[in-house]
Image (cartoon, rainbow, N blue to C red):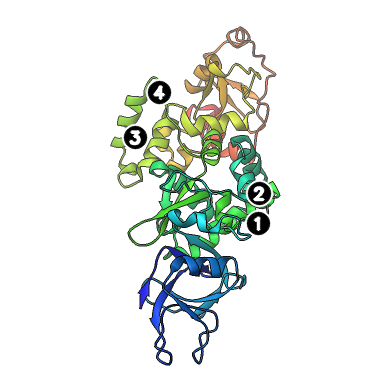
Amino acid sequence: MTVDTRFALIDQDGDYRYPYKKSDLTTKRYGFALGRDRNGEGEYTEDLEQVIRAVVFEGKSVRVKTQDGNLGKSGNSLTLHARKRIMGYWIAPELLHLVTGATIRPINEGVTSPAGEVPGAPDAFDRVSALSAADYIEAYASISERITPNQQAMLLGHAAAQGHTLSMEAIASIGGYENYKSANTQYGRLGRLFAEHFGIDGLGNQTQALATAGRSDPKGHWQWTLRPALVEALENLGLIEGKVEAPGLMEAALDVNSDPKNKDIPETTKQALINARIGQGGYRKRMLRLWEGKCALTGCSVETVLVASHAKPWAEASNPERLDEYNGLLLAASIDRLFDAGLISFSDEGSILLSSVLEPDDVRSLGVSLESKLRLVAEQHKPYLKAHREQHGFDKR
């Protein structure tokens, strides 16, 4: 039996099932078996292009199996139109022209072929491709509470990968799944959340709402590349780290790399910690979003003078606390200096507290009154504010 990996049906478990050539003992025919393959019935051909057209356009069944020879519980002869058993299909880029105009589109729709041609995509794929980073930011805010931790881990790990490209097998590993089947399902569900938010129906595979598929790797797993607009959205949301150039970056790197807590953590986490150490990167962006781009105390909206501080001391905080946007305040630079030095602090209600060495007039000169309060205090802020007060002796008074 000879498997041809240039065309595959994807079953409900996410397995790729390829047509294979076989011999019919009754009629002595040989090739790919199309249609009803019993008692000498059905059609045999050695032309894969004929198989693709028959399956995609005519709805015929074809005998398939996995690359390792497994026939699987879904059956040996399958049709693309058995939607409860088949999720979609994949076709080698050089053969994409064969399915131009097909109602059911391949999972790797829109991938440029070696000849440089891009087949016409259906409305659903075109609509996803036209989405902007702002669209994805709005969608993420809307569906974030329904995203599971595993789905979140897969998405952010995918975004942090080289070229934002990974196989589903690698994505499965990031999500904590033993194989790509479960990851395929969960990533597809995440894609569906985005697609439903956008009101887009008809994608060949829901993962296409997140990424586009390209050539397969040596194991036969195709590579998924996260959509650029989604990558930009995740960076703007502060969920992944963008390029940071700021004073103190080298010192922060030395600090993070020498910390025993960070011995075995991923490089992407180290970079996030380095950026957070100096109040930059994703940490700063999340704080800007939380405080709507304004100083937590004064409401100043000049972004260049706003500092993303930490309330709980860096040395005493765990890595998750160091990256938590609630562990600190977004403050105008002059006020941040006072807060960082422990000359001011804040109660759980947000009221300003002054150190005994600081005169009220010194604070007033900065445009802050003794009645000034933080613009908001979330429950998540309170443990960190308490840690700041304890560090600087405010709770002993």
Amino acid carrying label 1: it is Gly
Residue at left offset 36%, top offset 56% = 217
- Label 2: how many residues lie within 10 Å, few (<14), some (14-19) or many (20+)? few
Q: Earlier in the sequence, mark 4 or mark 2?
A: 2
User: From mark 3 to mark 2, how far is it between C-alphas?
Assistant: 48 Å
Residue nearest the viewer, comparing 137 with 20: 20
The residue beneath circle 3 is 256
Rendered residue at 38%/36% (across/down): 271
Left or right of 293: which side holds 4?
left
Judge from the rendering whether residue 224 lies leftward or rightward of residue 270; answer left or right: right
Q: Position of residue 269 (x, y in %)?
A: 40, 41
Within 10 Å of the Cα at label 4, are there few (<14), some (14-19), or many (20+) other Cα atoms?
few
12 over 232 or under it: above or below: below
Q: Which residue is mark 2?
A: 123
Distance from label 4 to label 2 (Cα)? 41 Å
Instruction: Give the foreground label among 1 and 4.
Output: 1
Say if mark 3 contacts mark 2, CB within 8 Å: no
Query: Which residue is the site of mark 4?
Result: 245
Q: Earlier in the sequence, mark 1 or mark 4?
A: 1
Looking at the image, tell me whether mark 3 or mark 2 is earlier in sequence order. Answer: 2
The amino acid at mark 2 is: Asp
Single out the mark in the foreground, 2 or 1: 2
Dot 4 or dot 3, earlier in sequence: 4
Q: Label 3 vs label 1: CA separation?
A: 47 Å
**Which comes before the other along the chain, label 2 or label 1?**
2
User: Which label lies toward us, 4 or 3?
Assistant: 4
C-alpha span from label 4 to label 3: 16 Å
Label 4: state its secondary structure.
Answer: loop
Q: Which mark is residue 202?
A: 1
